[in-house]
Image (tube, helix red, strand yellow):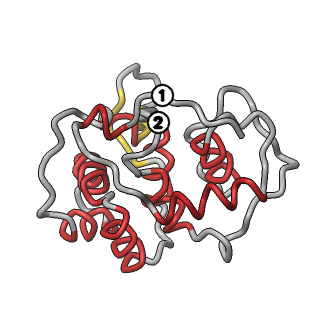
């Protein structure tokens, strides 16, 4: 897997990215579980998220369904969500949609996710995603707890993505406008 040197999410948001133990772990695991045409760790993470059922975003028409990827004993879904939200990631906002989808469907160990977010400094990203998700479904229990857990996080200087990128429209038969929105889960 070649490492490109693109702009990072940290650069766009005016933040500093730290040396991440999780990222080092993932680079090592990605080397043991290679995916064809994965040009970066982010491509590998997208493939892993897709394999785990997050299908709102795919790699540029490429997929490697035969690639052996690690199971949840090797990389937990909480680690996967945290990795997708890291400031060190390439500035590709669509990968945040995968993290949001994994959170919206539930089933994560929330205390573990919060612990990893604190350690990996992704609380600001999760807080912003929670704000966007709660605009769509204000009573979503997981997003409400995440918003409460990271309420001390300062607002970001740039938008992560538009709130509609976390949802799909609910259409009324025979009408062209959405009657509402639902989080992609």
x then y, percent, for residue 102: 50, 58
Examine the rendered structure and indicate whether residue 64 appears above or below residue 24.
Answer: above
Q: Residue furthest front?
A: 19
| Label ID, residue 90 | 2
18 displayed left or right of 95: left
Task: Tell me how many marks there are.
Answer: 2
Examine the rendered structure and indicate whether residue 164 appears above or below residue 28.
Answer: above
| Label ID, residue 6 | 1
Q: Residue furthest top?
A: 176
Looking at the image, is mark 2 or mark 1 earlier in the sequence? 1
119 displayed left or right of 56: left
Quadrant where the N terminus is found in the figure: top right
x then y, percent, for residue 51: 70, 53
- Report the residue at 59% width, 51% height from top: 54
Examine the rendered structure and indicate whether residue 7 appears above or below residue 183.
Answer: above
58 displayed left or right of 118: right
x then y, percent, for residue 86: 41, 51
Disc 1 crowd, CA 10 A, few/some/many (<14, 14-19, 20+):
few
Disc 2 crowd, CA 10 A, few/some/many (<14, 14-19, 20+):
many
Quarter of the image holding residue 82?
bottom left
Kindly indicate whether the residue at mark 1 contacts the one at mark 2 (C-beta within 8 angstroms): yes
x then y, percent, for residue 173: 47, 29
- Report the residue at 68% width, 36% height from top: 2
- Report the residue at 51% width, 30% height from top: 5
Mark 2: which secondary structure?
loop
Rounded to the nearest whole Å, what is the CA distance between mark 2 and mark 1?
6 Å
Mark 1: which secondary structure?
loop
Quarter of the image holding residue 62?
top right
């Amino acid at each position: 897997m070649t490492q490109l040197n693109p702009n990072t999410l940290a650069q766009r948001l005016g933040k500093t990215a730290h040396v991440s133990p999780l990222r080092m772990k993932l680079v090592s695991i990605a080397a043991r579980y290679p995916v064809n045409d994965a040009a970066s760790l982010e491509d590998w993470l997208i493939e892993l998220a897709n394999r785990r059922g997050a299908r709102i975003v795919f790699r540029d028409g490429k997929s490697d369904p035969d690639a052996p990827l690690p199971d949840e004993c090797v990389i937990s879904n909480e680690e996967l969500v945290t990795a997708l939200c890291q400031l060190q990631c390439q500035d590709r906002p669509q990968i945040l949609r995968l993290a949001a989808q994994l959170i919206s469907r539930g089933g994560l160990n929330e205390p573990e996710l919060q612990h990893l977010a604190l350690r990996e400094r992704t609380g600001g990203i999760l807080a912003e995603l929670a704000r966007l998700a709660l605009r769509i479904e204000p009573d979503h229990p997981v997003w409400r707890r995440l918003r409460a857990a990271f309420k001390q996080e300062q607002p970001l200087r740039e938008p992560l993505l538009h709130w509609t990128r976390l949802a799909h429209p609910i259409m009324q038969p025979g009408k062209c406008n959405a009657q509402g929105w639902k989080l992609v889960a």
